[in-house]
Image (tube, grey):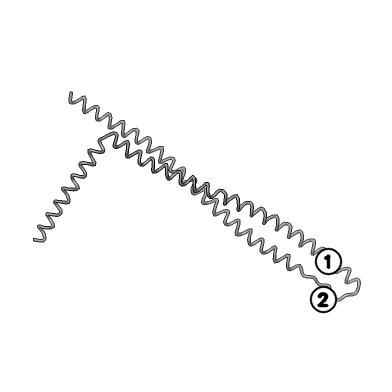
Amino acid sequence: MAKSITRFFKVAWYTITACRNKQVERLMENPEAVRGLYEDVIRYKLSRIQRYKLGIGRLIPFVEQKKNLLNELTNEIALLEKQKADAIAKSESTAAELQKAGMSEEEIEQHPDSIDLALAEKKVRVAKVEHELERLQNDIEDHKLQLASLHRDLERFKKEQAEAVAELIQEENDRKSRRR
C-alpha cells in the first residue's frame, strides 16, 4: 500500500515537472523571451559593476587620507630626529663646558629620552599606517580585477544574446519556410 502511494506521488511529481520543462523549452524557443533573459543577466552584471565602482570610489579617499597621514608622520619623524641630533649636540657641548667648570659627571648627564620616546611612537604609527595603506591598495586592486572580470562577462553575455536570438529567429524562419 505504501509503495503504491509513493508511486502515485512520484508519477504526479514527474508529470508536473515534465509539464514545467515543456513550458520552459517552449519559452526558450521564443527569441523575445531569450532576449529578455539575457537582458536580466546583463542588468545584473551592470549593477555589480556599479557596486564595484562605488566600492573603489569609497576606498580611494581612505587611501589618500592614509597617504597624507603617512607624509605628516614622516615629516614629524624627520623633525624629531633633527631635534634629537640637536639636543645631543647641545648636551655634549654643555657637558664639556660644565666639565671644564668642575662639575661631577652625574650632575652633567642629560637624558634625551623624551625625544626617543616620541620618535619610537611615531615610527610605530608609521608602520601601522603603511600596513593599512597597503591593505587598502590591495582591496582596490582586487576590486579592479573583479570589475575587469565583470566587464568581460558582460561583453560575453551581450555577444551570446545576439547570437542566441539570431539563431532562434533563423530557426523560426526555417520552420516557416518549410511549412510553405
Farthest residue toward the left? 1
Estimate the x, y position of residue 87 in percent, counting from the top left.
Answer: 79, 64
- Residue, x 70% and y 62% (percent of image)? 119
For mark 1, what is the residue?
92
Give the alpha-carbon distance from disc 2 to disc 1, as whole Å: 14 Å
Could you tell me which secondary element the residue under label 1 belongs to? helix
Amino acid carrying label 1: it is Glu
Instruction: Place residue 121 in its image quadrant.
Output: bottom right
Q: Which quadrant is the N terminus positioned in?
A: bottom left
* Marking on residue 65: none
Q: Quadrant of residue 161?
A: top left
Number of residues whose C-alpha sits closer than 10 Å to that of mark 1, classed few (under 14), some (14–19) or many (20 or more)? some
Pinpoint residue 78: horizontal percent, then vertical percent: 72, 57
**Image position of 29 (left or right of 124):** left
Q: Is residue 159 above or below residue 86?
A: above
Name the amino acid, label 2.
Glu
Q: How crowded is the residue under tag 2: few (<14 C-alpha within 10 Å), some, or many (20+)?
A: few
Q: As drawn, is 172 to the left or to the right of 43?
A: left
Q: Compared to 126, does 178 lie above or below?
A: above
Residue at position x 30%, y 37% in the image: 34
Q: Which residue is mark 2?
A: 106
| Screen quadrant of the C terminus | top left
| Among the 4 quarters of the image, the one containing residue 94 | bottom right
Secondary structure found at label 2:
helix
Residue under the image location 53 percent in, 51 percent down: 138
